Amino acid sequence: MTFKANNKPHGAEFDFSPFAQITKRALEANLRKMQTAHSKLDFDSQRSVRSIAKQLPLWPEDRRAIPNLFVRSALFNARNKNIPRHYLKDAEIYVIGDHGSITYTGEELRQDDETVWLQLIQLAKELPLGSSVEFTPYEFCKALGWSISGRAYIRLREVLTRLQATSLKAYSSQLEKGVSLSMLPRFQWRDHASNTSLPRYKVTIAEELLDLFSDNRYTRLEWEQRLALPTGVATWLHGYFASHKDNFPIRLETIKQGSGIEISSARHLKAVIEAALKQLLAAGFINSYTLAEGRVHVSRT
């Protein structure tokens, strides 16, 4: 069966955010020239170079970035929120294809954790990795499209705490690099001396993460599109398909393993995946999909 969406003209898009980062681009260009020429750097230039060397690459403000290795794996699985989370210890996480390997310790991560992590990375890209990123729970929840309430703030703290209590070993065969890190090395939301909540949460992103973003081996997700999708299989497929320039057919069983969903019935699995594909179709992420002989093929603009 093949399903198609109505083609809608897309309005012109203009992102003003790159202008705020022209200085960074210029410094990066100068850095490349100086490295090529083996030039000596003065103190201020050395400090700028060290800062740039630890910063994530640039991407538009309406996108969120994530290493390909993560969205092509079950690291952030798509299991139903009603299923209790397992605690994993040195667990081999399923990775689609020969892109690399992931070994994980901690409470299992799901698509809602990925949404929070994507926003953290967005904030962290403006600073050298290892620096403290600060935000209010109000502005963070607002950026996620969550309700502004005490319950949402508790949920945010639970996700951040879960991301902090992790140990991850990731190897990318494409980059021929491996890293060992915590998904969130530092998270502070309470003043222990006064036992009161801080007005601004403080987090730190691991410097080692930069290796997984190198050589353009990361995916830029359309943020508003992701937020409009139901959290679960639809958001996982959104990330997986976005990580490929050319979308080749993928087996339903591969989607099952890659998304980490636990469905034993082949008929039920097909129904769940097709429902997610219809959601991607309605969101305008794909133009059409074909589901036949146990495989899915999508067409994108």
Image (cartoon, grey):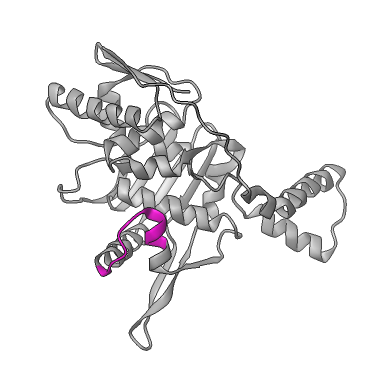
**Image: 230 above or below 186:** above
Horizontal side of residue 226 vs 34, given as left or right: left
The x, y position of residue 106, in whole percent, is 30, 54
Note whether 70 is above or below 143 in the view shown: above
Instruction: Name the residue rendered at 38%, 73% in the picture.
Output: 189
Q: Compared to 269, does 228 lie above or below?
A: below
> Is residue 241 visible to us here?
yes
- Identify the residue at image location x=48%, y=23%: 301
Q: Residue furthest bottom?
A: 194
> For the point 29% across and 16% down, which residue is it?
295
Residue 63 in the image: state x and y as whole percent.
50, 43
Viewer-proximal residue, 1 or 177?
1
**Residue 180 place in picture, x, y as percent:** 46, 51
Residue 87 highlighted magenta (yes or no): no
Q: Is residue 136 left or right of residue 270?
A: right
Q: Quadrant of the N terminus?
A: top left
2 w.r.t. 82: above or below = above
Q: Give how far across and how far down residue 14 sits, in percent.
A: 61, 41
What residue is drawn where x is 40% and y is 50%? 168
Foreground pick, 234 / 145: 145
Q: Which of the two residues, 170 or 45, is positioned nearer the viewer here? A: 45
Q: Is residue 94 visible?
A: no
Horizontal placement of 254 versus 198: left or right?
A: left
Specify the segment rendered in magenta.
Answer: 140-150
